[in-house]
Amino acid sequence: MSSQREAQRGAPWVLDPVHSSVQFAARHMVVATVRGGFAKFEVTVDFDEARPEGSQVEARIDAASIDTREPQRDTHLRSADFLDVEKHPWISFKSSRVEPQGDGRYRVVGDLTIRGVTRQVALETSFAGLAKDPWGNQRAGFSAEASISRKEFGLNWNVALEAGGWLVGDTVKINIEAELFKKLA
């Protein structure tokens, strides 16, 4: 059945990693936001242009590729206090459904696994459209956002601040920019 669907749609969609990113943001000491991203990730997209709600997404992120532009913080984030990359080298997402929201917006619902803990997450996704590049390939662009509680994934390390609050906020905002392409010829 899957190969029949592929034959109907033509060439598969492939992630263009040079024009894509996986980023996050979390509060630091209540007063600031720290941003970072992951340098290495793989995404497989079965994008159905005619029926986007029939699309599927799978992603794997190399947890050790975390980068917040501060080497000591990155080392701490890789440690057992946070991502524990020695035991859990991958962060993964697998969609279970795509819900149309109107006007090129979709809710991509699926299982996010961080540090061996899996929770259902909804990515609020916008479809930027299709374009043909100068080399004859079809391009598609997507933006996705979600907010998660890091504690729900076992990322509990923290320090209480003398003035109140915590060193690291619980909410982590995720932002994904994805450009896909497929060869038309």
Image (tube, rainbow, N blue to C red):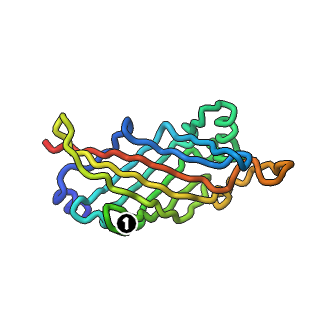
Is residue 79 shown left or right of residue 179? Answer: right
- Residue situated in front as seen by the camera: 122 or 88: 122
Task: Give the image location of residue 108, x and y in percent.
Answer: 41, 63
Identify the residue under disc 1: 98
Specify the farthest residue to the right. Answer: 162
Task: Give the image location of residue 128, x and y in percent.
Answer: 31, 52
- Amino acid found under the numbered disc labelled 1: Val
Identify the residue at image location x=55%, y=47%.
24
Is residue 132 shown left or right of residue 59? Answer: left
Whether 149 is drawn above or below 135: the answer is: below
Identify the residue at image location x=38%, y=47%.
178
Question: Is disc 1 placed on a helix, strand or loop?
Answer: strand
- Residue situated in front as seen by the camera: 140 or 112: 140
Whether 79 is drawn above or below 113: the answer is: above
- Residue situated in front as seen by the camera: 89 or 155: 155
Task: Give the image location of residue 43, x and y in percent.
Answer: 39, 48
